[in-house]
Amino acid sequence: MNQPETGKAPAAAHGNSDLQQKELAEVLRQRAATSAVLRAIASSPHDLQPIFDTIIDSAVDLCRAELGAFRLSEEIGFRLVASKLSPALSEMHPRPILEHGSFVGRLFGSKSPVHIPDFITHLEGNSLGEAEREAISRGVGTLLIVPMLRNDELIGTLSLSRLRIEPFTENEIELVTDFAAQAAIALEITRRERELRELQIKLAHTNRVVTMGELSASITHEVNQPIAAARNNIIAALHFLDGNPPDLQDVREALAAAVKDADRVGAIVGRMRALMQKASLRSDPVDMNEALQEVIELTRGEALKNGVSVKTQFASLPIIAGDRVQLQQVALNLILNALQAMSAVSEGARQVIITTRQIELNDLYVGVQDTGPGLSPETLSRLFEPFYTTKPNGMGMGLTICRSIVESHGGRLWVSACQPHGALFQFAIPAQLS
C-alpha cells in the first residue's frame, strides 16, 4: 500500500488558503470601488467631474494600469474630460482631442470593447500620426478601450493603458465595462435632469406670460394713471411759466411731480419686463419683503377691480439666496388667485392678508390669506395636480409650477382652509444667507 507523502497535503491546503484570501481581498477591493462610484453618483447628481474622477481612479488602481482616460464623443473627436497617470507618466499628458479620422480615433470609435495586448506590434504596418507616435514614445504596451453607449449610440469611452505588455483579464475587462456603464448612466441622468430643468423654465415662463396677460387690463390702468398725472403736471408747469413774472417755485414743484409720475411708470414697466423675461434658474441675494411689495404694486389694479383691500404684516427678514423672478412668480400666482377668489364674495369684507416671518429651523415663511368662499375638501386634495383647475379658462398649471419653484429652492408649499371661510396658501424656504 502506498503511503502518503508527509507534509504535502497541509502545504497544498495552505496554498489554497492563500489563494482564496487573495481572491477575497480582490473581491472586497472591487466592491469598495463600486460603492465609491455609486456614492459619487448619488452625491453629485449635477456634477459629472467627481464621478468621472472616482471611476478613473478606481479602474486604474484595480487593473494596475499606468494611464486611464475618460473621453466624451463630440463632433470634432473624443474630448478628454478626466485622466489619471502613474508617477512614471507624471510629466506627460493625454491629448485633449483625438480626431475621429485618426487611427487611434477609429479605435475609440468602436461600439465594442477593444483589447490590444501588444499595442506596438498592433501598430506595425499602419501609417502613424502624431497621436500614435506619442503613444509609442510613451511605451504603451497594452491598451483597453471600453465604449459608453446610450441607446446604441457611442457617447464616450473609458480607456486603460499599461506600459508593460500584459493583457487585461476577462474579469478586469468586465469590471471596466461595468464602470463605463455606470458613467453612461450618470451622463444620462444628468442629461435628463438638464432637459427637465429647461422644460420647467419654459413652463414657468409661459405661466408668467399668461399671468401677465390676465393682469394686462389692470396694469394698463395702473400705467395710464401716472402718465395722465405727469401730463397734467407738465401742462401746469407751462401755465406757471406763462405768468408775469413766471412762478418758478410752482414750476419746480409741478415738474418734480411729473418726474415722480414718470418714475412710477418706469417701475411698473420694469417689474413687468423682469417677470416676462425667460432666464435660467439664478441664485442671487433676495429681499423677500421688497420682492413681495413689488408684486403687490403690480396687482394693485386687480385688487381695485375686485374691491379687495390688501394688508401686509411683514417681519424683519434676512437677505436670502434665490431666484428673485421665480419667487416673485410664486407670490404673483398666489396673490392673483386670492384676489380673483374674492369676485364670488357678495357679503362681508374682501380682504387679502400677506404675511412674512421666520419659523422653526430659521425657515423663511410667506402666507397669503383671503376671505373668499374657500375650497372644498376635494379641491384641497387635488389643488396641486397638473391641469386641475377651478377657473373656467385656467390652464391648471400655475400652482403646480409654484410648488416646483418652491421645492427647487429647498422649500415646501401647502394650503389650508380658514374658518369661517377663505383659504391660506403658505410657503417656506430655507433662510440661508446669501
Image (cartoon, rainbow, N blue to C red):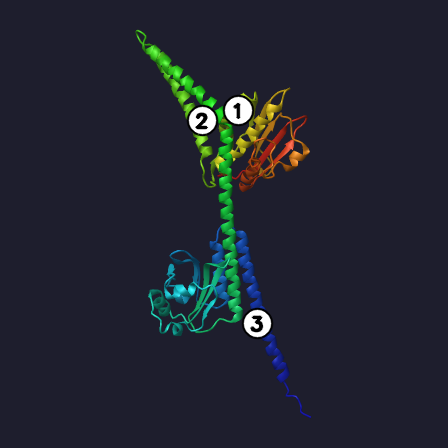
Which mark is in front, 2 or 1? 1
The residue tagged 3 is: 22
Counting other residues with Cα less than 10 Å from the Cα at mark 3, is it few (<14), some (14-19), or many (20 or more)? few
Q: Earlier in the sequence, mark 2 or mark 1?
A: 2
The residue tagged 1 is: 302
Q: CA distance from mark 1 to mark 3?
A: 76 Å
In the rendered image, which quarter is residue 245 located in?
top left
User: In this view, which residue lies farthest toward the right?
Assistant: 1
Which numbered disc covers residue 320? none
Which mark is in front, 3 or 2? 2
Instruction: Name the residue type under label 1.
Output: Glu
The location of residue 49, given as percent across then percent down, is 46, 54
The location of residue 74, given as percent across then percent down, is 41, 56
The location of residue 357, given as percent across then percent down, is 57, 32
The location of residue 306, given as percent across then percent down, is 56, 22
Taking the image as shown, residue 347 lies to the left or right of residue 204, namely right
Whether the residues at callouts 1 and 3 have beta carbons within 8 Å, the answer is no
The residue tagged 2 is: 268
